[in-house]
Image (cartoon, grey):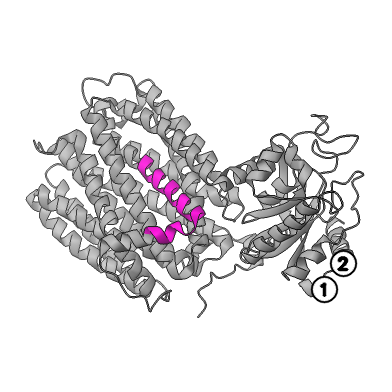
């Protein structure tokens, strides 16, 4: 059985959206299993946090520290056991593992029921740790399952649905936990019943998850968590783009953990709200991040669009910093409910900041998860996910230590939010400089969506895996940027060496790994080096794009194609995909009526431009004349 991700039907790609996955057995039982599990985790965690913060008086666990301690206990197993769980997820069939983890959840919730009835906080904290163990086992299975059942065009939407479902489950779990535990006298009983009921429902939905074959059934389990953790991190580091994206994901969890762990204290001590206000803040946060996750498919046009990540990072910092300024007012003397809270000056600004902060976090995280899944080797994918979970756990524990340390040092909760927002800006800038592909895709996204109304047709012909040579007409200096926006993966462009001297564009194309070329008669060394670099890129399975006209058109018409394509194919026979850019002639970046980029208002902003991709050609049938004919037909 093939382990490659299924290819989506192009016809379905045009009609269906991410919500249609909920009607399909390959996705729906899995979705509801993870939804119920996330909801149960958060119902129990938040109920316990509220119990300690508002109802019990424990000298050894102050209310301000309760959320931090509970969050750290839940995350600790991810650090300790993720390496082992990643091996299990690669070695064994995944639906079987899901059924085991949901059965384990029932047993843990039965133990938690006793802890709630006896008000035994140490026992309840032990159950938090055990729920973390169960979630550690489920995590690699969860994210390795998706690429086995979704095609590349569905992966962003599927991840968006999972992220949306997770945070809606967090929302509902936290709201239910806060409301149930606050019921006088019997709140603990209601929480216990709800946790057991959700665990049983999760086990029932797991029963319908379809068979998902093991990707590495011959794997020998290394039970030493220390050596296996180190091995998994080295394995992930083998693909630097994937590894650095994992660091970016881990930072997002660091960032989010600060806010989630401090919400009860923020509501009570800063905003003067009761348990219901704490729940309201979580509602706002969860709706925001779920909305951001769902927007990813629409904004990415059903590809893995990592250009959304810098956009998300900018919004996270802006609204985290503004949250500090919007929440500095002194709280009322007495705790207030939701009705009084929303009537106080400035409280709506706090909620808007939280909602937008979370929305941008959703835009930030979903493309990163999709990239890690799509670019990890299938036989190692669960272990890569496990390595990601290890890093997530490490970052979240450091987050808890930082938040606790700042509280002890006398920082207020709004000041901690301010510090986190500033740190986010610094860390994001560092990650994007390490992985320039994020900035390149962000630039391409801005040009394609803000400068132009860019429409792509036939993009199913652009390969999502394997080497291929793209050939395209050359109309303007932004042609490569628009092609980057249209492709689901990076492209190496073969470009005239003189363009690298152009301010901004030259820096951008060097960042993109563009290959400089010159006429053989002018610079024979650059000429030969270019073809050697093209051959190396194709040998490594990359996409390479060449503009066979040899330069920008001077009159808007297609110029004769040169023979460089044939020279490339003679050394490395790969499929050739013809492309045609429409309606860029006359734009600021074209040479109509003089030099390019000389008349800023040559044509209005947000004009319609497009790209049409044709069916790939076999290398044996390619000639310059045939390629020119195919591109001309796409232009017609």
Q: Residue at x 16, y 61 (%)?
A: 110
In this orientation, which residue lies closer to the viewer: 519 or 505?
519
Left or right, 524 with reference to 210: right
Residue beneath disc 2: 626
Q: Is residue 255 magenta?
A: yes
Left or right, 435 with reference to 260: right
Residue beneath disc 1: 621
- Up the image or down, 43 lies above or below 426; here it is below
Magenta segment main secondary structure: helix
Q: Is residue 441 magenta?
A: no
Q: How many dots with numbers?
A: 2
In this orientation, which residue lies closer to the viewer: 363 or 444?
444
Q: Quadrant of residue 407?
A: top left
Left or right, 237 with reference to 601: left
In this orientation, which residue lies closer to the viewer: 103 or 339?
103
Q: Quadrant of residue 624?
A: bottom right
């Amino acid at each position: 059985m093939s382990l490659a991700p299924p290819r989506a039907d192009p016809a379905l790609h045009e009609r269906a959206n991410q919500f249609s996955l909920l009607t399909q057995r390959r996705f729906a039982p899995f979705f509801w299993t993870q939804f119920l599990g996330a909801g149960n985790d958060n119902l129990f965690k938040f109920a316990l946090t509220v119990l300690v913060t508002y109802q019990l008086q424990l000298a050894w666990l102050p209310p301000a520290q309760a959320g931090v301690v509970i969050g750290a206990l839940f995350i600790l197993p991810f650090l300790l056991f993720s390496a082992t769980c990643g091996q299990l997820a690669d070695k064994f069939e995944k639906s079987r593992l899901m059924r085991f983890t949901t059965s384990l959840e029932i047993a843990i919730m039965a133990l938690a029921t006793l802890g709630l009835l006896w008000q035994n906080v140490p026992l309840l904290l032990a159950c938090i740790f055990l729920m973390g163990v169960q979630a550690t086992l489920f995590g690699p299975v969860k994210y390795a399952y998706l690429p086995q059942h979704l095609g590349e065009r569905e992966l962003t939407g599927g991840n968006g649905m999972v992220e949306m479902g997770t945070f809606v489950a967090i929302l509902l779990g936290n709201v239910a936990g806060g409301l149930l535990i606050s019921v006088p006298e019997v709140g603990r009983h209601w929480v216990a019943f709800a946790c057991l009921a959700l665990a049983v429902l999760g086990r029932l939905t797991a029963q319908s998850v379809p068979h998902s074959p093991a990707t590495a059934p011959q794997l020998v389990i290394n039970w030493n968590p220390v050596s296996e953790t180190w091995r998994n991190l080295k394995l992930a580091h083998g693909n630097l783009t994937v590894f650095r994206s994992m660091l970016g994901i881990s930072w997002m969890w660091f960032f989010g953990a600060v806010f989630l762990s401090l919400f009860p204290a923020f509501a009570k001590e800063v905003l003067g709200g009761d348990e219901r206000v704490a729940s309201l803040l979580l509602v706002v946060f969860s709706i925001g991040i779920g909305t951001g996750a769902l927007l990813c498919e629409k904004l990415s046009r059903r590809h893995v669009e990592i250009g959304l990540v810098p956009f998300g990072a900018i919004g996270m910092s802006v609204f985290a910093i503004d949250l500090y300024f919007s929440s500095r007012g002194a709280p009322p003397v007495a705790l207030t409910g939701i009705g009084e809270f929303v009537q106080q000056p400035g409280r709506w600004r706090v909620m808007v900041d939280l909602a937008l902060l979370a929305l941008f976090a959703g835009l930030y995280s979903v493309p990163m998860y999709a990239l890690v899944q799509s670019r990890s080797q299938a036989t190692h994918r669960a272990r890569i996910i496990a390595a990601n979970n290890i890093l997530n756990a490490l970052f979240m524990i450091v987050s808890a230590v930082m938040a606790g340390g700042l509280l002890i040092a006398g920082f207020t909760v709004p000041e901690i939010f301010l510090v986190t927002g500033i740190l986010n800006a610094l860390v994001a800038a560092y990650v994007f400089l390490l992985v320039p592909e994020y900035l390149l895709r962000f630039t391409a996204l801005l040009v394609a969506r803000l400068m132009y109304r860019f429409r792509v047709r036939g993009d199913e012909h652009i390969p999502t895996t394997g080497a291929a040579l793209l050939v395209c007409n050359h109309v303007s200096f932004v042609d490569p940027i628009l092609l980057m926006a249209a492709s689901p993966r990076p492209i190496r462009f073969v470009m005239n060496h003189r363009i690298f001297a152009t301010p901004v564009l030259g820096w951008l194309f060097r960042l993109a790994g563009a290959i400089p070329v010159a006429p053989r008669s002018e610079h024979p060394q650059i000429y030969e080096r270019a073809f050697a670099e093209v051959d190396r890129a194709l040998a490594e399975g990359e996409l390479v794009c060449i503009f066979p006209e040899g330069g920008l058109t001077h009159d808007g018409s297609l110029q004769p194609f040169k023979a460089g394509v044939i020279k490339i194919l003679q050394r490395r026979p790969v499929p050739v995909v013809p492309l045609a850019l429409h309606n860029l002639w006359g734009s600021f970046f074209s040479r109509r009526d003089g030099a390019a980029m000389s008349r800023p208002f040559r044509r209005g902003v947000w004009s319609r431009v497009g790209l049409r991709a044709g069916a790939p050609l076999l290398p044996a049938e390619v000639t310059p004349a045939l390629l020119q004919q195919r591109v001309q037909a796409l232009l017609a």
